[in-house]
Image (cartoon, coloured by chain):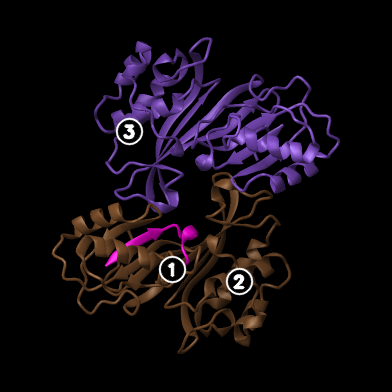
Chain colours: A purple, B brown
Amino acid sequence: VLTLEYDGTDYAGSQFQGDTRTIQGALEAAWTKLTGEQVRWNFAGRTDAGVHARGQVANTRTATRHALATIQRALNALLPRDVAVLAAQDVPWDFHARYSAWRRDYRYLILNEAWPSPLERERMLHVPEALDVDGMAHAVEALVGEHDFATFGVVDRGTTVRHCYHAACNAVWKDGRQTIEIELSANGFLRHMVRSVVGTLLQVGRGRLGASDMATILASHDRSSAGPTAPPHGLYLERVWYEGQPAAGSR
Amino acid sequence: VLTLEYDGTDYAGSQFQGDTRTIQGALEAAWTKLTGEQVRWNFAGRTDAGVHARGQVANTRTATRHALATIQRALNALLPRDVAVLAAQDVPWDFHARYSAWRRDYRYLILNEAWPSPLERERMLHVPEALDVDGMAHAVEALVGEHDFATFGVVDRGTTVRHCYHAACNAVWKDGRQTIEIELSANGFLRHMVRSVVGTLLQVGRGRLGASDMATILASHDRSSAGPTAPPHGLYLERVWYEGQPAAGSR
């Protein structure tokens, strides 16, 4: 199993899509060069075009006899510079990056300054208006617990119930700039869920919604009651958690 | 006078060079579009290809009657996304961004982790080997004060004596990663001076030089005794200071 960091700017997302540039495609091509094996890699979370990861997790079943250290070094040499393998570990045969994960941590970064930052233009969403961060922090707490999150996203099939373990919104003074960090951890996420939550929180931050409206919006199960989906470039898959493997995704 | 932030990755440096993509060229083109004036802009510090700025300062003399707020908004709309105007101020007629500056602050960022970070690949120098940061911090102190810095750079003409006001090297735990920040402030810098100092400090960090060798190397005035010039992508012009204008370069 590999822990991956990537800059999602120049990718059409994590999931393989033929000739399109994807993280899975890049990893599988590098893997074939290294081992000759043409295999599918399982990814813990599907990230959309432009979304970044600091702790994506991917696994496959392999017959290669290369040592883990060799695999990591070789993949980092073969992969493009915007993808890197931060850790490589052996796992039991029945491990599956997606199905074995019990928790995923996402983070969304907002630069809340009057003018944009060229250095962070692909790393944070720039919002020039002053935001009510206290209101956003209060609003996001409504998400903690087990809920039907149909308001905030879609699934290909199955339930839209998820368990949210942690939800926070904090103002952070970073390199002399006002930034806002939104953290969401859950057992799983619907498609566009984090960005849809962030878009709704921004409505609260701008005073268009009250902090206490969040619970009502969540309970409506109505996609159209959520705010507009926030852009992808502020979003990071930070870490994926596995039972008995607290080390996966950490460094 | 304008305070500029830029991502230097896709530029041949700050200084105008005909058709080559430069920060000065981009600013002057935007200025001409806005005002119709074809004028030279003075820059506080010359940054090389790939070097970034969070507080570059530039001024010109203008007959435009646009308000400062209009100028800033319009330039930010006209400039490419990797350059932004963070502040705009009126200054006395005899102000010169370069000659009126009494101090420049530079910062150099090193990612000191085993594996590279795709998200920081154009923002920090990646050094995988463990570095002796205490030794580097001790070594860099030798630069404080008035010295002939000929060891660490060249000038087109004039003296190589500069006054270094501040020199520091610190390990900083940033987003769960070991980073090293090197800060240098002086009344002026020779060409390649910061990167040459950083290259020499890296020799200390790797144990190839002792921390106390720095004073000897500085006193040698011999360019060949310095370490190899560190790459540009870890370097930032942070701030330029002007007498009676503590606000320039700050936000």
| Pointer 3 chain | A
Q: Residue B235: x and y, percent?
A: 51, 63
Mark number, residue A134: 3
- Residue bearing mark 2: B229
Q: Could you tell me how far apart the alpha carbons at marks 3 and 2 are, in whole angstroms?
A: 47 Å
Q: Could you tell me how far apart the alpha carbons at marks 1 and 3 are, in whole angstroms?
A: 35 Å
Give the residue displayed 25% in from the left and 57% down from the top. B72
Q: Amino acid at mark 2?
A: Thr
Give the residue displayed 48% in from the left and 22% down from the top. A191
Q: Amino acid at mark 1?
A: Asp
User: Is residue B63 a member of the stretch shown in magenta?
Assistant: no
Q: Quadrant of the C terminus of chain B?
A: bottom left
Q: Quadrant of the N terminus of chain B?
A: bottom left
**In this view, A18 is above or below B55:** above
Furthest toward the bottom, the residue is B158
Q: Is residue B248 visible?
A: no
Pointer 1 with pointer 2, Cβ within 8 A? no
**Marks 1 & 2 on one chain:** yes
The span shown in magenta is B1-13
Horizontal arrangement in the rendering, residue B70 relative to residue A44 (left or right) = left
- Residue bearing mark 1: B105
User: Is residue B11 a member of the stretch shown in magenta?
Assistant: yes
Q: Residue B76: x and y, percent?
A: 30, 54
